[in-house]
Amino acid sequence: MAEINLKKNIALSSLSKVLTILAAFVTNWFLARFLGPELRGKYVYLFTLNSIIWMFLDLGVHKSFPYLLQNQKVRLGGLYKLTLYTFLGGIAVIVALYFAAGDYIGKLANQDYPRWIWLALGLYIIVYQCYMRFQFLQLGSNQVRDYALMAFLPTFVFMVLIIPLFWLMPTVHRVEYSFLLNSLVLAVFLVFMLWKLQGTIGLKEHPDKSLVGQAYRLGIRAFISEYLITLLMRLDLIILKALGSYAQVGIYTLAVNFVDMINMACNTIGAVLLVKLTSLNDEVEALGIMRRILLLVAVIDAVAILVMVVFGRWFIVMLYGVAYVNAYKAFLLLIPAVFGITLGALFNTFIWSKGFPVISIIAPIGPLVLKLALNFLLVPRYGLFGTSVASSLCYVLWFAILLAWYFIRHPHMSLRLLIPLRSDVVEFRESLAKGALWLKNRLRPGQAA
């Protein structure tokens, strides 16, 4: 397996993520503008359910793939077949469950959607789970170019299709049909990825019991940790819907989308970082990498926040309408959350690279319980602003717990190892200059020659 080039992998995946964020932004703007807060809340609610359910079904197995491939040197074919078998089994279960108890599930879950949307949601969850496993197979086997491309294309194609097709959809079912189109686009790219990986890997290898056990033993730790983090990030939307309305969910998720756009870039860095860190045994070198990455992300956070503070209110009113103006106020209250969730997620990745220790499971529990309590206390009185305050407090607390555990557990290491050095700042500036020169050469090839 080729040596991992962290800078190249971060550059490729970051470029892909920037393009994905731009495509997602255009799509979110279009749907928010023409669905309105209430219907956009219903649309986002389906994806919130997916984010909570698919991880529960996956049990964190996708997160174990880079560790197994890089640290344990497991062969790719067995993990590919494990993913394929799980996908086919999941599809069969969802279809059988829908025909056996579709009406009951629809009534139990929500009366606000037609019955068939629950079948579409179930299939989307299975497709999304399989897609994520294949993405982490690509990462773990250092196929970062393919990973970056397949991370970007579904969002881009959906953006291209939704804008013209939206107007052909029946007005009363634009939420459901938009979700269905999103699901179909992801399914098409999953089929393409299956074909591409199958041609690379072949069909001879099968997962044995030890491989399955190892994947699930490692995965369950990552799952509990990541699931609690996802609940920390998304459960407030469920509570806001229960104690408020779809309109408040639609407005609040616009503010959260701006946070997510920043966090998406950091998650991309974290994904490739996990692959690199699992291949290292030198703790000081690993902390040095973390120090430089945390500096990079902190600068990204600060610049993004500054832009939103200065232009955010005007931007939201102009693009989304006056109905969404409270999203700007919610974002201001979420500023501490931006630093907490991005830096916390990266340091959590660093801890995962040590073999998914138990602290990665325990750390989110306290902040999650606190967030639930604060939501029930603040939402009835302050609505989405109460949710924003709860998020900021709890994300920062989560990051602090991770830092405290690591440096208490490793007393020979000092927190000062994470404080940026002058050389880090110089390296960062030189990297920016090289990136600017590369971009200038690409935009003016004649002059570069």
Image (cartoon, helix red, strand yellow):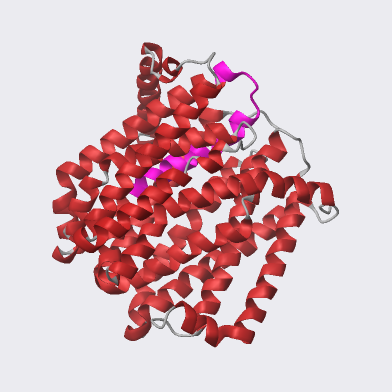
240 or 85: which is nearer to us? Answer: 240
Residue 35 visible in image? no
**Displayed quadrant of residue 192:** bottom right
- Residue 160 lies, in percent from the top left, at 40, 64
Span shown in magenta: 259-285
- Residue 373 lies, in percent from the top left, at 35, 54
238 or 295: which is nearer to us? Answer: 238
**Displayed quadrant of residue 327:** bottom left
Residue 278 visible in image? yes
Residue 318 against residue 247 in the figure, above or below? above
Asked if residue 271 is among those painted magenta in the image, a careful observer would answer yes
301 or 338: which is nearer to us? Answer: 338
- Residue visible at 21% across and 38% down in the picture: 306
**Displayed quadrant of residue 275:** top right
Task: Provide the major secondary structure of the magenta segment.
Answer: helix
66 left or right, relative to 319: right
> Where is the N terminus found, in terms of image quarters?
top right
- Residue 150 lies, in percent from the top left, at 55, 53
374 or 260: which is nearer to us? Answer: 374
> Where is the C terminus found, in terms of image quarters?
top left
Asked if residue 224 is among those painted magenta in the image, a careful observer would answer no
244 left or right, relative to 131: left
- Residue visible at 22% across and 52% down in the picture: 330
Residue 206 against residue 94 in the figure, above or below? above
343 left or right, relative to 353: left
- Residue visible at 21% across and 41% down in the picture: 307
- Residue visible at 71% across and 62% down in the picture: 86
- Residue 316 lies, in percent from the top left, at 19, 56
